[in-house]
Image (spheres, rainbow, N blue to C red):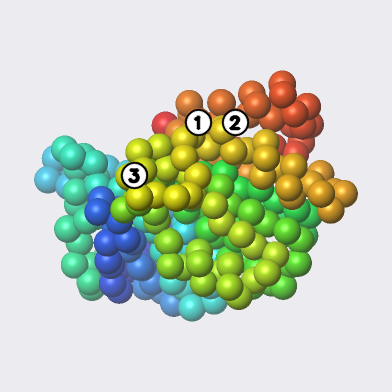
Amino acid sequence: MAAPPTFDVRLTHAHMITPNVKELHFVRVDGAPMAHAPGQWISLILPLEEGEVRRSYSIASPPRANGTLDLAVTHVNGGPGSTYLHAMEPGAALRAIGPQGLFLRTPKVGPSLFVATGTGVTPLRSMLHAALDAGETHPMMLLFGVRTEEDRLYKEELLAMQAKFPNFHAEYTLSRGSDAWQGRRGYVQTHVKGLFEELAQGGATPHVYICGLKKMIDGVRELLKNDMQLPRQQVHSERYD
């Protein structure tokens, strides 16, 4: 298998989308399309003082002919990679390697339940945008677990997607929601079965796409396998740790 290509990207703009997550918008310097498959990731080569390091991030945007891509980076206290990326100024350039990864969704596969925690939502965002923009009409639902109301990545965007696409719905569940929060609470595992059954009412068995930390993924996969007898061919996952 050929090695993934190396290319340069330039930061065009960036902004905070939660108190500790920054969305960074890059463009390929060579002007080539960003022809990744939704769900894939790239590695960035960061020129730190102690030497170059490589950090990998799922691409949060769908494939674009104009060579742009979005990443969402959580700032980790004491983390040299995330600290460097959060401090980058527009116009700065980096080397990138990719795209890579096999966490993919077959187009028009049918009803789909997307399950994410934190920035695990980024490859699912890419899949959702690609599917909806291509005119898919199968029911699609996102179950997104975060800690607090402030941690709801892409809140306004997901609401706009719901309004535009009647076959898409997003549900947040908060593990540390305030007393004022009136939505779902607890871990994503609490809500997977009910939302899956809702999607399955049309007669087709949904596929499930899961991204986040290993503990969450293991819990959801065990639920799907042991409690719901979902064939493993219907379950797709990628972990961040």
**Which quadrant holds residue 127?**
bottom right
* Disc 1 + disc 3, Cβ < 8 Å: no
Q: Work out whether 68 lies above or below 107.
A: below
The three-letter amino acid code for the residue at tag 1 is Met
The three-letter amino acid code for the residue at tag 2 is Val
The three-letter amino acid code for the residue at tag 3 is Asp
Q: Secondary structure at mark 2?
A: helix
Instruction: Return the residue at label 2.
Output: 220
Instruction: Return the residue at label 3.
Output: 179
Q: Measured from the top left, where is residue 196 in percent x and y?
A: 70, 43
Instruction: Return the residue at label 1.
Output: 216
Q: Secondary structure at mark 3?
A: loop
Q: Earlier in the sequence, mark 2 or mark 3?
A: 3
Quadrant where the N terminus is found in the figure: top right
Residue 31 appearing in the image: yes
The residue drawn where x is 60% and y is 31% is 220
Q: Secondary structure at mark 1?
A: helix
